Image (spheres, coloured by chain):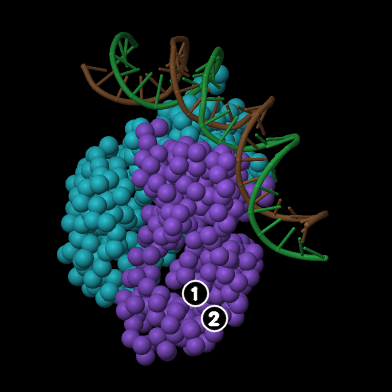
Chain colours: A cyan, B purple, C green, D brown
Amino acid sequence: MLKRRKTPVEIKHTEPHLCSTELRLRILHGVSFFASLEHAQIEEINHQFHEKGFEPGDYLTFAGDPADSLFIIAEGRVKLLRHTTAGKDVMLDLLIPGEFFGGLSTSSDSTYLETAQALTSVCALTIRREAFRAILNQYPAVGMQVLDLVTARLEAAHDTIHQLSAQTAEQRIAATLLTLAAKLGESHEVGLLIQTPLSRDELAELTGTTPETASRVISQFQRDGWIVTGRQWIALTDPKALRQTAEMET
Amino acid sequence: MLKRRKTPVEIKHTEPHLCSTELRLRILHGVSFFASLEHAQIEEINHQFHEKGFEPGDYLTFAGDPADSLFIIAEGRVKLLRHTTAGKDVMLDLLIPGEFFGGLSTSSDSTYLETAQALTSVCALTIRREAFRAILNQYPAVGMQVLDLVTARLEAAHDTIHQLSAQTAEQRIAATLLTLAAKLGESHEVGLLIQTPLSRDELAELTGTTPETASRVISQFQRDGWIVTGRQWIALTDPKALRQTAEMET
DNA sequence: GCAGTAATCTGATCCAGATCATGGAATGAA
DNA sequence: TTCATTCCATGATCTGGATCAGATTACTGC
């Protein structure tokens, strides 16, 4: 067997309080749905946000807790999941800086429906639900951007439903790898590297299978020469072949 | 075996052009996200909508077609679905009057991602994408309502993903029956009647199983005395038992 | 380095549900 | 009424992937 290289994913041990005040403006400027605002307006808004740091494994929100805030990820990776009575988690989304979650609508229940767990060190900006809605009221263009983002997430969720209903585990895993690579991939000498510590367990939670099945499929893809993997990382060397597998007739 | 009663679901053969101009204002007034507008404002907006009638089986939109309009259901039932290479459709949602779909975001591709098919006679109001966005810009309160609706649909989609990933066919069918009953159920002498022609095929598309499995589970529920069914209709007589099944430990 | 730990791989078995096949019952058309 | 069509029920078989059980291997802390 080929000698495997060392992990190309560096786990950054960012300080959880990286989210210093000096960086907040820069972060808010970077958030896509504030793109339409002037610098002065963002400074204004800035005062309504609070920053919070989290360590890997920490819960940003926990399903069932009272929901009064919206979170914007400033730094790090967060998984959004639902728990199962049997203890098996289902990952619904993997959030990256600039994305938000949490108490958004007024109509929804006053508790979080989903758990958000830090995968890395995370810095998040939080804002009270009412304050955020006030911003949306004041700046319709921001509301429009937020609507676009939620709509895109709805489409993505529909995609997942389609996959779960009609495709094999192998196809779902291939499709998921491509989606992840598109979202957070990074060119690397070994291939398109999925720049997030991602275990087989997590891949299984994300694709609706078991860790064993995920491992078997990943092994097969590796034997086929389509990917290179190690502990907690995966790099795609032949995305085209994966695409073909994902879209294969069942 | 017990003699079953005739179908309690009347298939209304509404004229497709029911959607007469005189009714449009009433319909627009009834749509939840225009609730915040004055009568005069709705009259103004009214001019930008066009009405279209459809027969059962007709496609309102077809996945892949150029998307330039948003649809609001005024009358009838519409299923939102994605096609599979193998011909097996996956139903993503079942829309009732007041709900919308179609070209919403500016950022999305210019083609419809999903097919919308009439289950009954349908009357829909359509509006050009840009015109709708202009309305959102002009009336932030409307945008907020729309955002709430899309957010609620995202939550519902997450629920479906959770179910598909972690629950048995029996549990998903029980949960789906309850959801449908909550959305479009109607009290009836035989129980809480799901007031939509719903075949085993469609129930299967909606729950990610096969018609055979749907039929078997429905038969079992009937033997248990939890539901009463016939051709194209189902009435819940013991929602509590269904709830318990749906939430059972796996 | 080296040992310990946690992630990963792989084999063996089992089962929920898909698939294939067929008979029966409700509805609609002539 | 009678036929034809469509929908529904149900039996028999098969299989993808879950589950159970270890064996390996990559990384971590000392």
**Residue drawn at 16 percent across, 64 percent down:** A47
Disc 1 secondary structure class: strand
Q: Is residue A242 left or right of residue A182?
A: right
Q: Which mark is residue B74?
A: 1
Task: Name the one closer to the observer, A168 or A107.
Answer: A107
* Amino acid bearing label 1: Ala
1 or 2: tag closer to the N-terminus: 2
Tell me residue B152's x, y (percent): 37, 59
Quarter the C terminus of chain A occupies: top right
Q: For residue D6, which quarter of the picture?
A: bottom right
- Cα separation, mark 1 vs mark 2, equals 8 Å
Quarter the N terminus of chain A occupies: top right
Q: Is residue A83 visible?
A: yes
Q: Is residue A147 left or right of residue D29?
A: right
**Residue drawn at 45 percent across, 35 percent down:** A204
Look at mark 2 in the image and give the residue it sits on. B19
Query: Label 1 neighbourhood size at 10 Å, few (<14), some (14-19), many (20+)?
Result: many
Task: Name the one closer to the observer, A163 or A76.
Answer: A163
Task: Name the one closer to the observer, C10 or B243.
Answer: B243
Query: Label 2 neighbourhood size at 10 Å, few (<14), some (14-19), many (20+)?
Result: many
- The relative height of residue B213 versus residue A37 in the rendered view (above or below) is above
- Are the residues at dot 1 and dot 2 in contact (C-beta closer than 8 Å)? yes
Q: Is residue A85 left or right of residue C13?
A: left
